[in-house]
Image (spheres, helix red, strand yellow):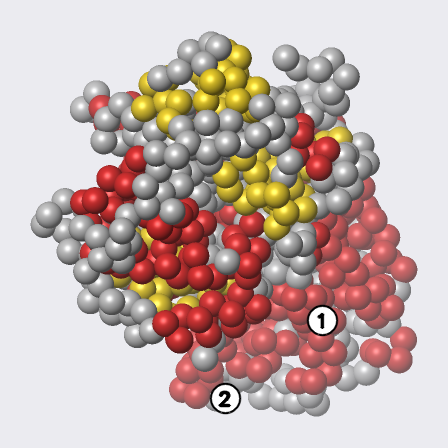
Amino acid sequence: MAARTFPLGGVHPPDQKHLSAAKPVEPAPLPDLLVVPLSQHIGAPARPVVKKGDRVLAGQAIGEAVGFVSVPVHAPTSGKVLRVEPAPHPLGPPQPAVIIEPDGDDRWADDLEPLTDPHGADPDEIRQRIQAAGIVGMGGATFPTHVKLSPPPEVKIDTVILNGVECEPYLTADHRLMLEEPDRILAGLRVILSVFGLDKGYIGIEENKPDAIELLGRKAREQGFAEVVPLAVKYPQGAEKQLIKAITGREVPSGQLPMAVGAVVQNVGTAAAIWDAVSVGRPLVERITTVTGEGVAEPRNLRVRIGTPVRHLIELAGGLRGEPGKLILGGPMMGIAHHDPDVPAVKGTSGVLLLPRDRVRTAPEGPCIRCGRCVDACPMGLAPTTLRTLIAHEMVAEADEWNALDCIECGSCSFVCPAAIPLVQAIRYAKGRVMARRRKGG
Amino acid sequence: MTNPNDPKWILSSSPHVFQGDTTARIMWQVVAALTPAVVWGVYAFGWRAAWVIGWCVAGAAAAESGALRLRGRPNALADGSAVLTGLLLGMNLPATSPWWMALLGGVVAIGLGKQVFGGLGQNPFNPALVARVFLLISFPVAMTNWAVPGGALADAVTAATPLGAAKTAVATHGALGDALAGIPWWKLFVGLQPGSLGEVSELLLLVGAAYLLWKRIIPWDIPVAFLGTLVLVTGAAWLGAPAKVVPPWFHLVTGGAVLGACYMATDMVTSPLTARGRWAFGVGCGLLTAVIRLWGGYPEGVSFAILLMNATVPLIDRFTKPRKFGWVPDAKGAAS
Ligand code: SF4
Ligand code: SF4
């Protein structure tokens, strides 16, 4: 049977996973300083509950949630709070952060209780525990997980999908997790299933990870509550709507969430974190991050404490190689370029990618030759070049009619454009303008 | 906090990797794909074929450089698009064309066909065809002075193109008679026929097109829709009146059908953006070509057909807006 996939568009970025795919996950030693941003998810940033000079223990809350769509932030290790002040942030301008000097003991707070019966617990209790553990989507979108697990009462969830696709080229963090800790992932899936009273879930994995498909597939069959679905290697196979379409055949309606078709998608790393939270009571203070690219000496998969400055991770990967070009947090298709290696790894940091200068395209933007490649590549069925032309003329209403808001910013259009036109950038701008116009009721 | 010794990292928006094709690479690959057919043209018609193409390319390049300079734009000759236009125009001319006509054609192609609209990507009509039609109207005699492929290749055919001869025969005698007798279609297919200097060898044009298809530089839907429609319509007409109508396989291998369908109708700038649009466009081109050839005043119809369809592209684009994901929720499809 041909592997399943989504129907429209998609591209095949050159796969560079071989750089790190065979490297087992190793714990990254603690850095001298941890920079823990109070905002690590979509939604309201946490409110700091520690101040300069406080001593903290690993797993102790240092920021509290300020509403439903918010989660607390925890100290990644024991040590002293040096400052609470704005610091470099992976998503853009500096944001308030708690800066901790580790004391080297890595002592854990002991008020963390596991749930007595993690698989039989009350759904509300599980959700509370997940929120209290500060768990957010670890695939990169960082949406608070408990919110995704709390659909309104009239919504019936019948499909839970774990996302092990990892379609971003270069990244191997999820791949390694699936190979090394399949049981944590499956246990986490079982917890999620119990929240919805379901007895079976799916795990989507791209076919370029046959070892993970084999291992998780076998375990899933043994345990009986999961099915591994091999998926064609095509970007953006890991995008939520594309993944749901590939696995269930259902198409999430434009402008709506996966729950509109009864589906909930969680990253495999998130599932593992959920299991830690309910089984040992451990909050989310670390994650696996791939430090890779042709621009580092020794690409690696590292178990990284949240707040570790990227500079430290680059050193752990043997330092820079070649003439530095780009420093990217995330993958090459959707990651964000940075200029400051003091930026910390956070809950959503799946990769630190270093591209040497000769890998960075610097061609100037040329005129659109209407080749249509961007249209053919768009997995959302949009016409990127048309959207760009419309928004270049500030034709906001028309950009709305041409469905600007449906863009998932996957970058496939820019990837294929022979004229080097920054289409995603233009469409991102268009989305902002369309939303502003809609708010005004125009 | 930033260490001044830190390297200067490049900042730009995602994505950070690219497929690698550039406009220049696309244009030059089309030029490369045309080369076998051009070489055949030179072999068949002698050096004057190269001479004609050379003047077309020179005219196009000069017009491109001049116009960009006037507009204060950086010179863009290296992107290959002007050279390609000149080359395509040359391939559409008789090998007997005088040098000044070729030069003028090149200038008109770029000047009137492209730069007046704002340059690369902005022109609604295929520039080479604009120039060809301009020359056809201005110098009708020179434009239909078909050379017989030289030397040993010159047997059996007259200096009229097979389609022209057929048209004349039907007009004067009311039937094809033996206008096509003694011309096996495969001879036309490999390029032993009079015609424009670059369109005579369908075989080599198809080889080049296959390369471009393989490299995904041209879409397959336009040529297939174009030639398929041409065969269907001329085939139906031929079945209805075999004594008066050229059989469909002759329509395929004569005139500019293959050159037009694979290299001119597929011009990205002047064809629709979406797959559905490209189908509509290709069918339209094939239909118009057939209508002009069957009932029009000219033996050839490809140029006019493509230009007419170029004019409809904005309309086609509007009516073939892509079907967006999530438009028709299919809530029943269960995981199976
Ligand atoms: S970034 Fe947006 S417009 Fe471009 S391909 Fe992806 S979904 Fe389509
Ligand atoms: S890919 Fe680039 S050049 Fe091609 S149609 Fe889209 S914007 Fe234009």
Instruction: Look at the picture and state if A228 lies above or below B117.
Output: below
How many numbered marks have been drawn onto this rendered protein structure?
A: 2
The part of the image, by quadrant, that contains residue A49 is top left
* Rendered residue at 53%/55% (across/down): A177
Question: From where the camera sits, is residue A7 visible?
Answer: no
User: What SS does tag 1 mark?
Assistant: helix
* Residue of label 1: B207
- Which chain letter goes with mark 2? B
* Rendered residue at 59%/80% (across/down): B250
Query: Can you tell which mark lies on residue B127?
Result: none
Q: Nearer the viewer, residue A311 or A7?
A: A311
Residue B193 position in % (x across, y down): 74, 75
Question: From where the camera sits, is residue A305 visible?
Answer: yes
User: What SS does tag 2 mark?
Assistant: loop
Ligand 2 within 8 Å, label 2 CB? no
- Which chain letter goes with mark 1? B
Q: Which of A75 and A215 is in front in this view?
A: A75
Residue B334 position in % (x across, y down): 25, 69
The part of the image, by quadrant, that contains residue A119 is bottom left
Instruction: Look at the picture and state if B112 lies above or below A87.
Output: below
* Residue of label 2: B243
Residue A441 left/right relative to B174 = left
Circle 1 crowding by C-alpha within 10 Å: few under 14, some 14–19, many from 20:
some
The quadrant of the image that shows the N terminus of chain B is top right
The quadrant of the image that shows the C terminus of chain B is bottom left
* Rendered residue at 66%/15% (across/down): B2
Amino acid type at circle 1 is Val
Disc 2 to disc 1, C-alpha distance:
33 Å
Ligand 2 within 8 Å, label 1 CB? no
Q: Which of A309 and A392 is in front in this view?
A: A309
| Marks 2 & 1, CB-CB < 8 Å contact | no
